[in-house]
Image (cartoon, helix red, strand yellow):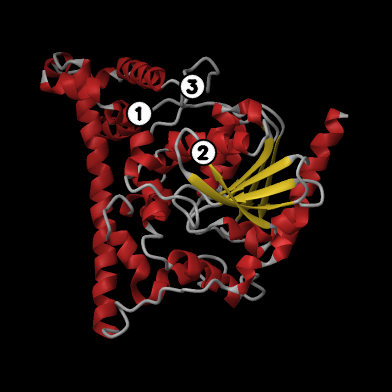
Amino acid sequence: RAAADVVDDSDVLHAALPLAEPILLSLKGGGRKEEKAKASRPPFLSKDPAANLRARKDESERASDQLPASLFFFSPWRCIPDRLMVTVRSLLFWALVYTYCGLCACIELLKLLWSLGTKPGKTFQWLIRENPPGCLNDPSLGTHCYVRIKDSGLRFHYVAAGERGKPLMLLLHGFPEFWYSWRHQMREFKSEYRVVALDLRGYGESDAPAHRENYKLDCLITDVKDILESLGYSKCVLIGHDWGGMIAWLAAICYPEMVTKLIVINFPHPSVFTEYILQHPSQMIKSAYYYYFQMPWFPELTFTINDFKALKNLFTSQSSGTGKKGCRLTVEDIEAYLYVFSQPGALSGPINHYRNLFSCLPLQHHEVTMPTLLLWGERDPFMDVEMAEITRIYVKNHFRLTILSEASHWLQQDQPDIVNKLIWTFLKEESRKKE
């Protein structure tokens, strides 16, 4: 009865089932057959939460029926109820997540102890930047605006450039970024578009709800739809980078009618990512921060120590791909990031995005139906480039992939001229096709 109650009442258990299956199969020596994506599958995120829960439960039950016979070779296995198997597999999945989380935390703790031993006076010193650098108020980037969403009650900050009434280009940043990461694109595309660079929920000057449950993927996707409608538009060109790319993919899947063209930078189709990371240890290592961020408060602390050294290194070090000659990130650009993320509590909202990721899985195999451009910096230390090519199978419409060999994860910032040219080519190419 207890096990049945857990399965009936917990969306997390059903979400974890397909991800836990490869663990059991590997223990039993089984294999997992790849299934072709079917449009008839239930939607990844339904507008009706109850329908979404039922869809995930149906998916879990189908997965249970597909277990290899080797798992039930001995008679005791045949006696285990399906719901108990779901519970066992879910426990295995979460054991994997938190074991890896603990390992990552131990590594970060060792780094902290090393810093205390070598720089005891600087480790716990950091500066809250009180005045924004001038670049954040550059009039050439656009106008700072706010919009309050009626349903959620949240206020979002965005910067808009270009005339009202022109087609909307909506820009979604990644982690740890904010609207300013799109500065080069805002200057470039404002001549033909109403360009809106958003601070995502919990970032920058947008509202940051206190509870981590407010950062689930369905909330983030609904934000995109609500903001689009609040701006007076019914459709847009949607562009996302990194975590914003994840949101852009899912928004295009859930609300295809509102996305005319999809452009994603350095993030694969979500289904590719969730399957690839389980089958490739290299990507699991690169995505270690996904697991590390499951911990409370400690990730925020490690980002803060030594005056936000970890944040600076993300954008400037050789390992992150931007610390090379000709890097387009200036000292003032770095100060802009330090100003935003040095504010009290400014890191909790962004990290809460990741704290809810695993409870939102699995992501169903759904195709994207609009023309799609995927741009990828090959020197990305966080994402295996192989995922970019696999993404092709999930795009039903025209798909264009461009991999830039000398570009980093922060592609639109360190190679803006090339990125802008590729985006223009894609947009004009699709416009000619319509004509």
Picture coordinates of residue 227 (x, y %)? Answer: 58, 39
* Point 32% across, 66% down: residue: 302
Q: Is residue 37 visible?
A: yes
Amino acid at circle 3: Pro
Mark 2, residue position: 149
Alpha carbon of mark 2 to alpha carbon of mark 1: how far? 35 Å
The first of marks 3 and 2 along the sequence is 3
Q: Quadrant of the N terminus?
A: top left
Name the disc covering residue 43, or none.
3
Dot 2 or dot 1: first in sequence order is: 1
Q: Amino acid at mark 1?
A: Pro
> For numbered disc 3, what is the local secondary structure?
loop
| Left or right of 248, for residue 260 | right
Taking depth in this image into account, of 24 and 104 the one nearest to the observer is: 104
- Give the answer, above or below, for where 393 lies relative to 421: above
Marking on residue 18: 1
Residue at (77% x, 52% y) in the render: 190
| x, y percent for residue 205 | 50, 56
